[in-house]
Amino acid sequence: MNSAIEQVGTPNAAADVDVIVSIRDLNVFYGKFHAVGNVSFDVPKNQITALIGPSGCGKSTVLRCINRMNDLIPEARVEGRIEYHETDINSSNVDPVEVRRHVGMVFQKPNPFPKSIYENISWGAQINGHKGNYDELVERCLRQAALWDEVKDKLQESGLALSGGQQQRLCIARTLAINPDVILMDEPCSALDPISTLRIEDLMRELERQYTIVIVTHNMQQAARVSDQTVFFSLGENRMGVLVEASQTRQLFTNPNDQRTEDYITGRFG
Amino acid sequence: MGPSGDTIPANREHEFGEIPGSATGRGIAPITALGGRAPVNLDLSGHKSRGMQERIVGVLLWICGALSLLTTAGIIFVLFQQAFVFFQQIPITDFLFGTTWTALFKTPLYGVLPLVSGTLMITLIAMLVAIPLGLMSAIYLSEYAPNRAREILKPALELLAGIPTIVYGFFAVTFIRPDILVKIFPGIGPFSALSAGVAVGILTIPLVASLSEDSMRAVPRALREGGYALGATKLEVSWQIVVPAAISGIIASFILAMSRAVGETMIVALAAGSKAQLTGNPLEPMQTMTGFIVQAFSGDMVVGTPPYLSLFAVGLLLFFITLALNLISQKVVGRFREAYE
Ligand SMILES: Nc1ncnc2c1ncn2[C@@H]1O[C@H](COP(=O)(O)OP(=O)(O)O)[C@@H](O)[C@H]1O
Ligand SMILES: [Mg+2]
């Protein structure tokens, strides 16, 4: 078996790629449960990195380490280095609030605030001390999230009144409003219908030029459609999530290095 | 997904009925339970006595429900009836708009405004104490307290609500006034709206805290995470996401506390004094509607006389005020409730 560590670097071997987030020997525990073991991979700048693997293998857990969301779970413990622009975000002098202002997140279930569409977007900017014109900001973010035309006449209505797909785009727009570097997306389309899903995928490709995206998906076609790099996780001993392979998406899907990857993408589980 | 229930030919139902937990199997479960599994001679009629038991229990419960409803109706009826007799002797406008209340004096006047203003003043003071402290406790308990602390503090808070109000009353007279209020307001007398109001406020803190905390805890975790993911601090998430999302329950808790304060009796009887006066100065003694009722009952009264009947008029007014507050609270809850999902 190839170990995870040996796989690292392969996708980023090309010299023209900047690494924006670099994960080394990441271990996560929930109480005594060792949920993720020795995960290492790099996230290239201005690309889409997909995390795939069977359910429960720790994809969300790894993703939530990148913006220190696991700090909110009292029993979670994170070990290892996560470098964001060469700063270890887990070191004691780093404020998780500051990390999250650079690394935004979109969740599996759309979670707009029970505020107006306008406020859903302006709120994040406001707490981040945005000084510019708020009307312009709201319009720009909604346009970027391909939602403007649908909501421009009802900006004062509640964000909860939108459809699921619109809510998810609103959540993407509100993340754009804090002007992050990296956007984490945890199965952003799993609660959406196929048309909304395609719109969000188009949106991701659009955003890739300006942002770096890490997306968790259980949908392999989606990973193949949108991502540049794919990281495949699997369940190891004691239900611990391990990284099996991290490669260029095309390579991972056509010519995987690891037998387990091949079994998974061809539908032979276990 | 298999074929849907309606498309399965009747004679094949039993085959699908065997698939445990499949979508098809669940969809047509009521049919398969009889058509597929039941032996021909299965007796489903149950024990004969069970039907009888159920009926008796049903009747008993109905009687209990009816009884409590009847009691309420009876109380309201008596209030109305006696108040009606009162208003035949004293014009209702004199009662509602008069500014002097001397019901137990030799030359009585029945202007209820001093009692109403006393009630409102004490309620206002109580809310100025209970709303900030109660809300802050709720935010602490819901957002900041570690699980262990909450497990101890929440029941302790609810225990506080179980202390007899008379204890708060003499607490106000023997501690709040001499040890705290006198130091801030040297002019305060032995009895005042302020010391009663502060004590009523302390009494209602647990109510505000507990109900507000419940509604804040009901705010989905996903909303908080959405806030944190935008780089919000805990304070920003608590105040700007959780509190607004829970606002219907929070406002309802304020109104319930208010209605509790309006009806509070023992504390005001002990600490507010018994001087019905129309004044805006909280350092003065005041009498509330409930305070008057207590005072009237502790003196001599002749049944059927205007002073006696005035009790019912005051009681009726009190009933309307609390009823209005409760209706407002229901409206508020319905108005602000956000539908999640
Ligand atoms: N808050 C938590 N407390 C305890 N265990 C958790 C928690 N969150 C996730 N886990 C466990 O960690 C493992 C990985 O979960 P997760 O990262 O959500 O997987 P995935 O996103 O790949 O489905 C699972 O076994 C899950 O049960
Ligand atoms: Mg997940």
Image (cartoon, rainbow, N blue to C red):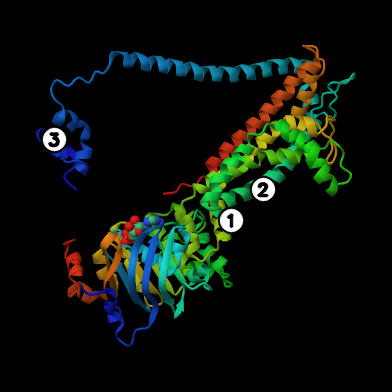
Question: Which chain is mark 3 on?
Answer: B
Q: Residues within 10 Å of mark 2 (few under 14, many from 20)?
A: some
Secondary structure beneath label 3? helix
Q: Could you tell me which residue is drawn at 57 percent across and 41 percent down?
A: B155
- Mark 2 = which residue? B133
The residue labelled by disc 3 is B13
Rendered location of residue A151, percent (x, y): 45, 60
Examine the rendering and report whether any part of residue A188 can be seen: no
Disc 1 crowd rating (10 Å Cα; few below 14, some 14-19, many 20+) is: few
- Find disc 1 in the rendering and name its residue: B239
Q: Is mark 2 within 8 Å of ligand 1?
A: no
- Mark 1 lies on a secondary structure that is helix
Q: Amino acid under label 1? A: Trp
Residue at position x 59%, y 72% from top? A131
Where is residue B145 shown, x and y percent of the image? 56, 53
Q: Earlier in the sequence, mark 2 or mark 1?
A: 2
Rounded to the nearest angstrom, the CA distance separating label 2 from label 1 is: 15 Å
